[in-house]
Image (spheres, rainbow, N blue to C red):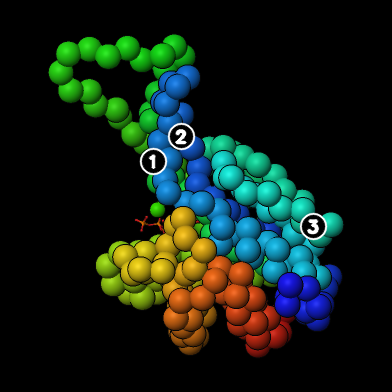
């Protein structure tokens, strides 16, 4: 384990990281979700903890375990629950990284009993969830706010748009259409863009290596901002 003897660059910092998908319930047996595995967010939590930070990991349903004295894990299910937990903890944080794949829509009505099939097609009405990251962008004071953007088309363009619209300090863009990048895999291909529009790219590395690289740039930009 070559990462364990890291210097404590994040000592004294409180970091909140969100990871994994959310689940939006339809009825007692069904839900809408997405392909996020949580691996990138868990790698970030582990790296931050090894660098000395006090980490709050807010995770959707994932098949991952984490055990580190600096990490407090809070499990949630829906986008609404993630919103509540994150906004509750936001004031105390120094850095917030939103790597979770939050559902953009949820079923407007939850069926109390199991839905029964009928002849013909069926339409489920969906309503928008709240944008957690955009809400944090509006509320933020001293916090360094990092978003993720998983894209298939013109990733950098969309990433720059989200950086501005959500009032972020940095965005991590990944092109999920390339091999070796995206949801279930152990590797990723990312570009980190800060507020000055400086871009740093990592061409395919493990999610652990990417996590440490991202913290190098975050720490650099934190110092630059002189918070
Ligand atoms: N995000 C969030 N709350 C939501 C939706 C997204 O906090 N309801 C966050 C994600 O955690 C991520 C960032 O916003 O850090 C970008 O998510 P993404 O899905 O790429 O962008 P959206 O703004 O949802 O736009 P779209 O899905 O249309 O690309
Ligand atoms: Ca989205």
Task: Return the residue nearer the eye: 142 or 158.
Answer: 158
Residue 95 visible in rendering: yes
Which element type, helix, strand or loop, lies under badge 1? strand
Residue at x 42% of width, y 62% of height: 182
Residue at x 71% of width, y 53% of height: 66
How far apart are the two marked residues, 3 and 2, measured between alpha carbons?
29 Å
Which element type, helix, strand or loop, lies under badge 2? strand
| Crowd rating for badge 3 (residues with CA inside 10 Å; few <14, some 14–19, many 20+) | few
Which element type, helix, strand or loop, lies under badge 3? loop
In the picture, the quarter occupied by the C terminus is: bottom right
How far apart are the two marked residues, 1 and 3, measured between alpha carbons?
33 Å
Q: Nearer the viewer, mark 1 or mark 2?
A: 2
Name the side, left or right, on which 74 lies relative to 77: right
Is 149 situated above or below 128? Answer: below
Residue 87 visible in rendering: no
Name the outermost residue toward the front. Answer: 1
Residue at x 60% of width, y 75% of height: 209
Residue 105, numbered circle? 1
Name the side, left or right, on which 210 lies relative to 203: right
Asked if labels 3 and 1 touch by Cβ distance under 8 angstroms, the answer is no
| Crowd rating for badge 2 (residues with CA inside 10 Å; few <14, some 14–19, many 20+) | many
Ligand 1 lies under 8 Å from the Cβ of mark 1: no
Q: Position of residue 17 (x, y in %)?
A: 64, 58
| Crowd rating for badge 1 (residues with CA inside 10 Å; few <14, some 14–19, many 20+) | some
Q: Which residue is mark 2?
A: 24
Residue 186, numbered circle? none
How far apart are the two marked residues, 1 and 2, measured between alpha carbons?
8 Å
Name the outermost residue toward the left. Answer: 120
Residue 150 location, quadrant? bottom left
Ligand 1 resides in the quarter of the picture at bottom left
Q: Which residue is mark 3?
A: 68
Q: Could you tell which of marks 1 and 3 lies nearer the N-terminus?
A: 3
């Amino acid at each position: 384990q070559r990462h364990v003897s890291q210097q404590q660059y994040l000592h004294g910092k409180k970091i909140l990281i969100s990871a994994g998908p959310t689940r939006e319930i339809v009825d007692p047996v069904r839900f809408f979700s997405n392909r996020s595995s949580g691996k990138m967010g868990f790698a970030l939590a582990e790296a931050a903890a090894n660098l000395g930070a006090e980490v709050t990991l807010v995770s959707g349903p994932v098949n991952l375990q984490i055990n580190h004295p600096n990490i407090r894990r809070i499990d949630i299910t829906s986008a609404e629950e993630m919103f509540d937990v994150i906004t509750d903890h936001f004031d105390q944080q120094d850095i917030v990284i939103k790597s979770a794949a939050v559902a953009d829509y949820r079923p407007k009505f939850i069926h109390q009993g199991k839905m029964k099939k009928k002849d013909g097609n069926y339409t489920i009405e969906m309503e928008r969830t709240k944008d957690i990251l955009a809400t944090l962008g509006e509320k933020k004071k001293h916090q360094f706010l990092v978003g993720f953007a998983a894209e298939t088309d013109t990733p950098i363009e969309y990433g720059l748009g989200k950086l501005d619209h959500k009032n972020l300090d940095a965005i991590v863009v990944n092109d999920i259409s390339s091999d070796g990048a995206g949801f279930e895999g152990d590797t990723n291909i990312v570009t980190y863009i800060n507020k000055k529009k400086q871009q740093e790219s990592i061409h395919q590395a493990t999610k652990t290596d990417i996590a440490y690289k991202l913290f190098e740039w975050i720490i650099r930009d934190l110092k630059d901002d002189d918070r």
